[in-house]
């Protein structure tokens, strides 16, 4: 039997006779039948829904009939059920009785402008959180010096291995390729002026001063920063951070300081190794693409490596490392919620870390330019 | 004529690799009743549940759900709902979206009708006002109730609950128990509960089996209140009366 809700009208009174299966499998038909029946009730003051001829009913069918009765009553009409079908009557009563009347629909708007506005409105809070975290880290350093046992020093070698040694292949490869790119760019541009002999100097200056620390930091932010942020976020949502606090540990001293220290030590080393590999990349590109001999390239390189070129790059590296560590750990510690929050915080941490390394690198360059270094 | 049992388990053996958790396990769950699987920690209650819902394949024996057959072989609209211990809600989706997901996958319902059904299920478990909340924004008890609503959304007539009261305060636990009773009595749903919460067992369960790790199977079955008052099996008596039990003196349970 097919689903139907036939309206038998007698003046201002109507009987809606429900027939067929009122269940989840036929919910679309039931919805249509309810809609058609409702449209035919204009002018009715009272409505009875006759349930006796319903074949089968489940929660879905009961909900649709219950909401029909609710709407009719909300319109000021009398609405009730009748007929010998206690199961249907009980189900409908259950869903009517448990209905929540919401004060106002809580719809999460997806309007882009509203979302931008919400982000901007939250900026002061986010800045406050960031400064609060930086302040807590700054306070943690002298406290750690006074109470060294409040820092997890034992994890330091492992962290240096994970953050530094394990990242060496990927940072080295990235720097080697960047060295090749600078070499090729130099050959192409300087070659137009017959100044191929300046390619080694270009590689040294561009890579040692700017690209070496930046490329290394970006790779570390993407690799180790993501790892740190997700680990800290997972610890936060699984209440491990709360457990640490409850046992009297300061998570900043116990977790954040060793990680920042491991980064501050290893990132300059990775940068230094990366600088060497960039020189190799530049050499390979120049020797393969031009008539310059390896010996001549080496001579040009050695002449270009000055304390200024070397140190302006290496001085940046620990600051970039600290930014990555603080952002990754800070975002991790701010996590609330479940698995999705871990992913979201990790993404935010990586984006912020990469952006911050670029900004910090630019500020250092500006500073050195102003100082004439 | 008596109706067929909703679940029939016959000479079941389950385990992992060469390790046997339980064997020669036979029981039936009658339609429309609340059936509890009881036992101490590590006796294989949750493993038995995972086999009953088809997530694991048994080593031997037969599980037959009426109208479904062997659950691990079944494909199609899920014939039963499951409430996992943690609620297992998708944390990136709102409560309404969590309920909408199976509805969208298995029914043609969309738009206002789907919204109405989802809202009604949330209303049924008392979470109508929290439809747009994320799981991370509600309490543990509310997560479990939302899990119940999700288990109900496809109108299954069989629900499995894994430790529904675990981690809940007494009031939330009783509220959830009342909800389970409502589901069974008013909606005629068969409920299988894995638990070791005694107040919950005595309040909701019509029938139960008691599993014992040492015996690797069922050591008692029947009305839990009768077992509490009448059982002479030391393990069962100790379990229901929360008294101490010397497992080395009674290796067979």
Image: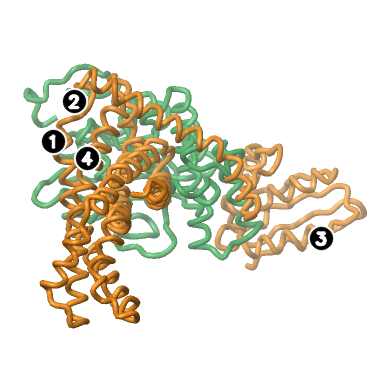
Chain colours: A orange, B green
Q: Are marks 3 and 1 on the same chain?
A: no
Say the numbered circle drawn on residue A262.
Answer: 4
Pick the residue in front: A101 or A194. A194
Q: Secondary structure at mark 3?
A: helix
Q: Chain of mark 4?
A: A
Q: Chain of mark 3?
A: A
Which of discs 3 and 4 lies nearer the camera? The answer is 4
User: Does A266 sit left or right of A117 as displayed?
Assistant: left
Question: What residue is shown at x 29% (from left), y 53% (from top)?
Answer: A213
Image location (x, y in percent) of residue A353: 38, 48
Which of discs 3 and 1 lies nearer the camera? The answer is 3
Q: Earlier in the sequence, mark 1 or mark 2?
A: 1
Tell me the CA gap for discs 1 and 4.
53 Å
Q: Chain of mark 2?
A: B
User: Does A96 sit left or right of B69 as displayed?
Assistant: right
Image location (x, y in percent) of residue B32: 45, 44
Say the numbered circle drawn on residue B235.
Answer: 2
Residue highlighted by disc 1: B215
Tell me the CA gap for discs 3 and 4.
72 Å
Q: Are marks 4 and 2 on the same chain?
A: no
Question: What residue is shown at x 30% (from left), y 37% (from top)?
Answer: B37
Q: Secondary structure at mark 4?
A: helix
Q: Residues within 10 Å of mark 4 (few under 14, many from 20)?
A: many
Q: Residues within 10 Å of mark 1 (few under 14, many from 20)?
A: some
Pick the residue in front: A368 or B216. A368
Q: Is residue A128 above or below residue B118?
A: above
Tell me the CA gap for discs 3 and 2.
64 Å
Q: Are marks 3 and 2 on the same chain?
A: no
Image location (x, y in percent) of residue B5: 36, 49
Which of discs 3 and 2 lies nearer the camera? The answer is 3
């Amino acid at each position: 039997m097919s689903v139907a809700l036939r309206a038998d009208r007698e003046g201002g009174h109507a009987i809606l006779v429900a027939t067929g299966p009122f269940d989840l499998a036929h919910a679309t038909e039931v919805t249509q039948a309810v809609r058609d029946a409702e449209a035919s009730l204009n002018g009715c003051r009272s409505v009875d829904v006759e349930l006796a001829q319903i074949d089968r009913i489940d929660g879905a069918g009961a909900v649709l009939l219950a909401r029909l009765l609710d709407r009719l009553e909300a319109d000021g009409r009398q609405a009730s059920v009748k007929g010998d079908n206690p199961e249907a009557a009980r189900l409908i009563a259950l869903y009517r009785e448990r209905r929540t009347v919401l004060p106002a629909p809580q719809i999460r708007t997806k309007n882009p402008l509203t979302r931008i506005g919400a982000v901007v409105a939250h900026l002061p809070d986010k800045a406050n959180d960031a400064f609060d975290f930086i302040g807590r880290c700054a306070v943690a350093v002298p406290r750690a010096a006074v109470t060294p046992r409040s820092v997890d020093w034992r994890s330091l070698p492992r962290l240096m291995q994970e953050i530094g040694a394990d990242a060496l292949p990927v940072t080295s490869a990235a720097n080697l390729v960047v060295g090749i790119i600078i070499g090729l760019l130099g050959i192409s541009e300087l070659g137009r002026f017959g100044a191929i002999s300046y390619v080694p100097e270009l590689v040294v200056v561009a890579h040692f001063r700017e690209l070496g620390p930046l490329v290394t930091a970006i790779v570390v932010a993407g690799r180790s920063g993501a790892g740190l942020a997700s680990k800290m976020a997972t610890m936060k949502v699984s209440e491990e951070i709360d457990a640490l606090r409850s046992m009297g540990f300061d998570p900043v001293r116990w977790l954040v300081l060793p990680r920042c220290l491991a980064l501050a030590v290893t990132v300059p080393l990775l940068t230094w190794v990366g600088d060497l590999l960039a020189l190799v990349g530049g050499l390979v590109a120049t020797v393969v693409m031009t008539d310059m001999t390896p010996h001549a390239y080496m001579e040009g390189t050695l002449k270009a490596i000055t304390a200024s070129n070397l140190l302006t790059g290496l001085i940046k590296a620990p600051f970039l490392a600290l930014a990555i560590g603080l952002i990754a750990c800070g975002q991790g510690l701010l996590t609330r919620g479940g698995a999705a929050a871990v992913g979201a915080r990790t993404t935010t941490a990586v984006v912020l870390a990469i952006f911050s390394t670029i900004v910090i690198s630019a500020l250092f360059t500006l500073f050195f330019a102003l100082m004439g270094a | 004529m008596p109706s067929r049992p909703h679940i029939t388990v016959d000479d079941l053996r389950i385990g992992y690799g060469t390790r046997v958790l339980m064997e020669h396990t036979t029981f039936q769950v009658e339609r429309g009743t609340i059936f509890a699987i009881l036992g101490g920690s590590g006796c294989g209650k949750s493993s038995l549940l995972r086999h009953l819902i088809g997530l694991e394949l048994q080593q031997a024996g037969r599980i037959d759900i009426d109208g479904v057959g062997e659950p691990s072989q079944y494909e199609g609209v899920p014939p039963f709902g499951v409430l996992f211990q943690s609620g297992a809600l998708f944390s990136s989706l709102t409560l309404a979206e969590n309920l909408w997901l199976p509805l969208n996958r298995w029914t043609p319902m969309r738009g206002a009708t789907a919204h109405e059904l989802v809202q009604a299920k949330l209303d049924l478990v008392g979470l109508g006002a929290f439809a747009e909340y994320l799981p991370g924004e509600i309490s543990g008890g509310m997560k479990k109730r939302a899990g119940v609503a999700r288990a109900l959304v496809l109108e299954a007539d069989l629900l499995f609950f894994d430790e529904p009261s675990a981690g809940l305060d007494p009031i939330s636990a009783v509220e959830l128990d009342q909800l389970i009773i409502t589901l069974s009595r008013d909606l005629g749903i068969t409920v299988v509960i894995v638990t070791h919460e005694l107040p919950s067992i005595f309040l909701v369960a019509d029938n139960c089996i008691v599993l014992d790790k040492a015996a690797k199977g069922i050591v008692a079955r029947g009305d839990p209140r009768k077992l509490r008052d009448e059982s002479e099996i030391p393990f069962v008596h100790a379990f229901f009366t929360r008294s101490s039990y010397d497992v080395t003196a009674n290796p067979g349970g």
